Amino acid sequence: MNYKRYLLAFIITSTIFVTTILISNKLSEDKLLQVRAIEEKMSIDILSLETQFELLQELSCGQITESTILSSELNTLGSKLSYMEGQLGTNDPEVIRLKRRYSILQIKDLLLMRKVIDKCDIAPTVVLYFYSNDGNCSACKRQGYVLNKLSNDHDDLRIYAFDANLDLSALRTLVRINKVGASLPALVINGKTYNGFKSLSDMKVLLPELIEETNTATPDQTKE
Amino acid sequence: MTIMYALLYISLYFEVFLLISFISHNKNKSNQEPQASVHKDCLPEVTIAVPCYNEEKSLAATLTSLLALDYPENKLHILVVNDGSIDETSNIAHKFASEYKQITALDKENGGKASAMNMALSNSNSELIGCLDADSFVDPSALMLIAHQFINDSEVSAVTPAIMIDNPKNILQMMQRAEYMAGIFMRRVFSMIDSIIVTPGPFSIFRRADIIEVSECADNVWLHAHGTEDFEMGLRLQSNYKRIANEPLAKVMTISPDTLYSLYRQRIRWMYGFLMNTWDYKHMVGNIKYGNIGILVLPTTLVSIFGGVYVFGLLLTNIVSYLLDALVHVYTAGFTLSVPRFDWFYINTSALIFMVLILILVLLIILHYAAQISHTRVRKRDTALYLLLYGLIAPVWLTGAVVRATVGAESKWKVIR
């Protein structure tokens, strides 16, 4: 028996194995860096908007609404972060750190949005969604499907999704202010908190403005 | 996930070990003098047994291919053993026997392939005895090449050929053609490291004295062995430290199953036979006394079978979970059809994916070498089908065989091939 051959096979296999893991880790790190870069860009954009808001009280609503495309970036960021969470696991420290930053960005975007709503004559529908992916919220996945569907169908619906288990003081304050209970999922719509799963039909009742919008859009579509 | 990585590591280690063995052996071989051919008067006498049960469709072609062998007529005897067929097999065998003096036809009650081989052994006295399943056809040079292996190495007790798929007609058979090509490489390397554990039915040739020596009774050399006497014979020879060689240029074409069900039945029988015979020879597993076969080939093959079952379970769980998720999605939010946008970000770059890609790459290298040593070519379409389908369907029969072996339900199929 040729023991040297066994050793050589071990060295080659281990080298391939370790190299593969290192390359995979490097690519994952690059992806996380990409997420971090988007977060940093968004952070600057939000800060800039807030500053603009403070500096120019008379800033025209047209300019403001043009600048509020941030929410779509938030969606992209959210989906990339969710993908990385699936790849690296919910307990990955870097994923948790990025999720915390993402939650802060969402809260800042939410506050900015409220200012816009106060100042201008626009009223986008805002939904706050609190979920948990600790395995103790069986309905959270279904609630996510419902909200995704609504978000895809209605451009002016803004959904801010928060992992209620994140250790973040700003998020805890948001939870406290909105009186979100322990039973998840929870939704905050027009300042009112709803605990438990809400189906598509429940949501249409809770968001009558969406139905109105759909109804008013129908005649235009039939004209074509 | 840890189990998955462990399985991938073992698979990769095994493939790397085989490649290193192959390359280093070839390097040594190129420095050796070519072996001279032997005068035909010095060739050993050979009996080729053709055990058959209801083989009326292929028997004539099998016998014709044997008659065309490039081997002295007076040194080659063909013994057709009709194992109680209920079709025209016996008539065809006797018709050939009356036309060609090399051929003898024998009839017996159905008793399985092992009993047919034992009958052939007791009705012959040649130095070498081989078997050709009645659904296989040999290349004219195959026997001469195999005989030279026996002549050049007196330690060799058995020689296995290169088995190929005959005229594949559908994607299942094309997939098997690539699989058999990989088998040519495996058998070649196993022979280099003295680890061949199966002497397959299509044209494995044995040294008569050696197989009788390793048997308890000269009348019962081939055992039923859970319906896979070829596995048992391989393991028995190895457990008695007998050499099994391989001749990759001795080509044998065999008819492969053409439906998923017949392929499943065949593989269940093979896998079940392997598991049960390995259990019978469990003293060899992990035993350094038996060299590479004990510490590498048998343990790795067992791990790959149970690993295949594990991966199948995992795959099935994931598919069921995905389908349930999709159902819940449709039920809660309705059916939405959206065109996905391509983004490099979402390309899966997990180590698992890379490992699988490396294993595929090694497999392609193996196929390349298989084509090289057997002087044939591997078709791209066969390779693609092999890579796409084999991983999906093989775990089904692996699982079936493990279940069958666990509950102890032996194959009851009567066909002796």
Image (cartoon, coloured by chain):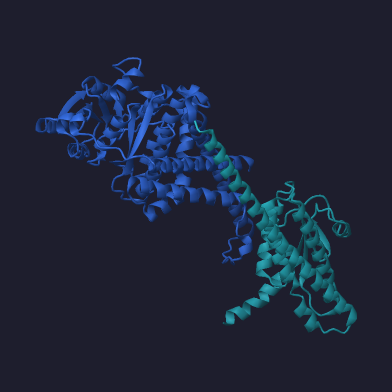
Give the image location of residue B401, x and y in percent: 46, 33
Picture coordinates of residue B223 (x, y %)? 35, 22
On the image, the x and y values in percent for residue B375 come to 32, 48
Regarding residue B287, the answer to whether it shows in the image is no
Q: Looking at the image, which is closer to me, B10 or B177?
A: B10
Q: Point out the residue furthest to the top here.
A: B217
* Left or right for B150, reference B56: right
Can residue B266 be seen in this snapshot? yes
Question: Residue at position x 58%, y 48% from top?
Answer: A16
> Please, is residue B200 above or below residue B386 in the view?
above
Q: Nearer the viewer, residue B155 or B4?
A: B155
* Number of residue marks: 0
Instruction: Indicate left or right for B327 with B284 as reference.
Output: right
Q: Quadrant of residue A32?
A: bottom right
Quadrant in the picture for the C terminus of chain A: bottom right
Q: Which chain is cyan?
A: A
Q: Is residue A67 above or below residue B220?
A: below
- Name the one closer to the observer, B363 or A157: B363
Q: Position of residue B138 (x, y in %)?
A: 25, 40
Vertical comparison of B298 with B389: above or below: above
Q: Residue at x 27, y 33 (%)?
A: B147
Q: Residue at x 9, y 33 (%)?
A: B99
Residue B120, relative to residue A96: is it above or below? Answer: above
Name the foreground residue: A54 vs A127. A54
Chain B shade: blue
Give the residue at the far left of this rendering. B99
In the shown orientation, is residue B132 left or right of residue B411? left
Res A72 → quadrant: bottom right
